[in-house]
């Protein structure tokens, strides 16, 4: 209502927009992209087809799908100058900081702050970022590992090529593992969009100033980095490793998580919207079991995770607060089984979330939403007379 300002920390009860992209039902654990259930999409199509659906609103025809895949491959070349930017980062730089910088640097290679009303312009920017991101991710990881950069192989599928660029080695022949390709494709689909989460709201508000698409995506990557958001997948594994190092005493960590005076939270548990279960966690948990079984990996970390989940689901504190495993609880276990370094986990989340961020940015700009500029209730000092520095105590 006009003139009355309501403060709503974390926007827990504030709607920021109308959107036709993703539907969540937190009570029933429903997640749909453009009306299609996530369970169907995760089973029946690949990540790029889901990206097309989210961004352009419809599942592509065979021709559209083939052209989209080909156009993305055609954009997988990365300007050699990017290597100079990579060289400038200290080895200790966190991959999320590197990727966020490289993404905004792409604006320099693509000056047009895309004319969003032009479908052709938008399409060009979409295939550009989807084509280049896997290379930037793989190069960032290999740079950190002191490995030579791999340019990939466009005869491979999108996820196959990403894994090859990440894991090929000059002195050995790289062998694709279809179990890992399938699991990663599914993970990227499950991370593709999630309505107005923290990083998507960031992309929208940055884009509302008419900052370019790549600059807005770069801001989204930074928001995703936080351990309460996308950074949780890295924090989950670090938590499980700490519990393992501490003798696997899950009960002790459950008590810590419930102790108001202890900042420790059970990472991978809880969600602002899902109050019964996160449908993505269900699918990812099954995929984690499958990957570890097919790879013959006995990962004690998974046993600790299952022990924590069992205890939390029976614990009054968690049940009363409707805290269940979320998308980040099991995804790290699959990334770890793939041999992806823990510091790269949130980068994998960012690759998956790209289509959602792009779709939401495009929807916001096409609807000509006003620049985001909330108000406040001022609670600071009332007017005071100036005090020259010599008179200050
Ligand atoms: C993602 O928004 C999205 O859609 C995000 C995401 C996406 O796809 O974009 O789904 C991806 O970010 C998943 C969430 C990943 N984060 C974590 O796993 C970090 C641990 N989770 C929590 O920090 C928390 O549950 C949040 C951040 C996910 C949600 O926080 P809320 O909705 O602001 O809830 P809250 O902090 O107000 O907590 C409510 C109560 C509090 O207790 P009381 O003060 O009422 O006594 O639940 C407690 C909290 O202390 N609580 C937890 C807890 N999460 C909430 N206690 C222990 N461990 C936890 N994990």
Image: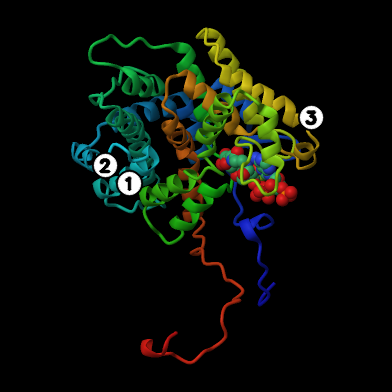
Looking at the picture, tell me which residue is in the foreground, 44 or 378: 378
Q: Which residue is mark 1?
A: 101
Q: Dot 3: what SS? A: loop
Side of 39 relative to 203 (left or right): right
| Circle nearer the N terminus (1, 3) | 1
Q: Which residue is mark 3?
A: 314
Side of 275 relative to 39 (left or right): right
| Label 2 to label 3: alpha-carbon separation | 46 Å
| Label 1 to label 2: alpha-carbon separation | 10 Å
Looking at the picture, tell me which residue is in the foreground, 38 or 178: 178
Tell me residue 32's x, y (percent): 63, 35
| Label 1 to label 3: alpha-carbon separation | 43 Å
- Residue 252 vs 169, above or below: the answer is below
Side of 202 relative to 121 (left or right): right
Disc 1 packing (10 Å; few <14; some 14–19; many ≥20): some
- Residue 377 vs 143, above or below: the answer is below
Q: Is residue 271 visible?
A: no
């Amino acid at each position: 209502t006009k003139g009355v300002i309501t403060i709503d920390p974390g926007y827990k009860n504030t709607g920021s927009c109308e959107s036709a992209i993703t539907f969540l039902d937190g009570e029933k654990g429903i997640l749909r992209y453009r009306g299609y259930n996530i369970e169907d999409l995760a089973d029946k199509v690949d990540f790029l087809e889901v990206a097309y659906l989210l961004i352009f609103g419809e599942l592509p025809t065979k021709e559209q799908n083939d052209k989209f895949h080909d156009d993305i491959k055609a954009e997988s070349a990365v300007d050699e100058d990017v290597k100079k930017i990579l060289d400038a980062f200290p080895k200790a730089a966190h991959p999320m900081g590197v990727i966020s910088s490289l993404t905004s640097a792409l604006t320099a290679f693509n000056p047009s702050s895309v004319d969003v009303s032009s479908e052709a312009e938008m399409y060009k920017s979409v295939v550009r970022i989807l084509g280049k991101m896997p290379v930037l991710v793989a190069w960032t990881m290999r740079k950190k590992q002191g490995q030579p950069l791999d340019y990939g192989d466009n005869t491979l599928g999108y996820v196959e090529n990403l894994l090859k660029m990440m894991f090929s080695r000059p002195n050995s022949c790289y062998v694709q593992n279809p179990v890992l390709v399938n699991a990663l494709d599914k993970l990227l689909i499950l991370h593709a969009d999630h309505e107005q989460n923290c990083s998507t709201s960031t992309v929208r508000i940055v884009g509302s100033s008419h900052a370019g698409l790549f600059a807005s995506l770069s801001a989204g990557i930074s928001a995703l980095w936080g351990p309460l958001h996308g950074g949780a997948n890295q924090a989950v594994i670090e938590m499980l490793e700490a519990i393992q190092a501490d003798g696997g005493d899950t009960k002790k960590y459950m008590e810590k998580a419930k102790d108001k005076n202890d900042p420790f939270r059970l990472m991978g548990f809880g969600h602002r919207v899902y109050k019964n279960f996160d449908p993505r966690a269900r699918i990812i948990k099954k995929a984690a079991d499958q990957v570890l079984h097919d790879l013959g990996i006995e990962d004690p970390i998974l046993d600790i995770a299952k022990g924590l989940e069992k205890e939390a689901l029976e614990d009054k504190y968690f049940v009363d607060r409707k805290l269940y495993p979320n998308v980040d609880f099991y995804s790290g276990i699959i990334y770890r089984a793939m041999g992806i370094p823990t510091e790269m986990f949130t980068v994998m989340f960012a690759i998956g979330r790209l289509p959602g961020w792009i779709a939401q940015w495009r929807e916001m700009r096409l609807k000509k939403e006003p620049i985001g500029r909330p108000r406040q209730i001022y609670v600071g000092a009332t007017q005071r007379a100036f005090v020259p520095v010599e008179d200050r105590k």
